[in-house]
Amino acid sequence: MTGPADGKKIHDADSLEVAPGFAHEKLEGWVPELAGEEEIRQALEKAFDYRGDVTITRKDGSKVEGYIFDRRPGKTLADSAVRLFPKDSDQKISVPYSDIAALAFSGRDTAAGKSFDAWVRKYWEKKAAGEKNIGIQAEALD
């Protein structure tokens, strides 16, 4: 489909590329081995995408459990940091990657099983069982 006088193409919504769906990885309960810089970076990227609390053990032995809402990757581990909302505080904290000795995906993953495909599957199971007035209801987050 051509557009204006400049000859540039105009795309309609049906011809636009569709992004593939996100495969949700089961991380709840996982304790990654943080052997080297690359493993630390990969684990913290997964922790950023995780929709539950994680427990960070610092190299000084102290622990903080909370929800990671931001990460700031830098050139070195000392220049990189994660930011989280601690479970027991309203104050945001920042932890440099270089201070992290261990990481555990300790909280319930609130996004697990919440995909549209899971909803459709449940819908058809309920419909096949003869249920009526089946609608979309949000599940409690606890």
Image (cartoon, grey):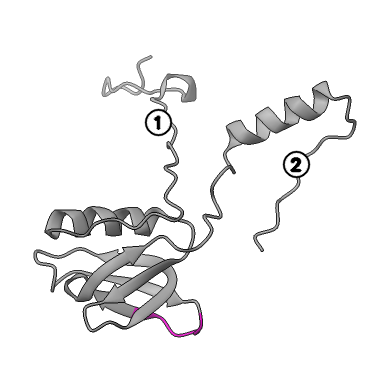
Mark identifier at residue 77: none
Residue 126: image location, x then y, percent: 80, 29
Residue 25: image location, x then y, percent: 42, 42
What crowding class fits label 1: few (fewer than 14 Cα within 10 Å), some (14-19), or many (20 or more)? few
As shown in the figure, which amino acid type bears the numbered disc 1? Ala
Residue 34: image location, x then y, percent: 21, 60
Badge 1 marks a residue whose secondary structure is loop
The N terminus lies in quadrant:
top left
As shown in the figure, which amino acid type bears the numbered disc 2? Ile
The chief SS type of the magenta part is: loop
Mark identifier at residue 19: 1
Placement of 118 over or under 76, stated as above or below: above
Residue 50: image location, x then y, percent: 43, 55
The C terminus lies in quadrant:
bottom right
- Name the side, left or right, on which 134 lies relative to 44: right
Which residue is label 2 attached to?
Answer: 136
The answer for how far apart the CA atoms under marks 1 and 2 are is: 24 Å
Front position in the image: 13 or 92: 92
What crowding class fits label 2: few (fewer than 14 Cα within 10 Å), some (14-19), or many (20 or more)? few
Residue pictured at 83% horizontal, 35% vertical:
134
Residue pictured at 67% horizontal, 28% vertical:
121
Magenta stretch in the rendered image: 88-93
- Name the side, left or right, on which 117 lies relative to 129: left
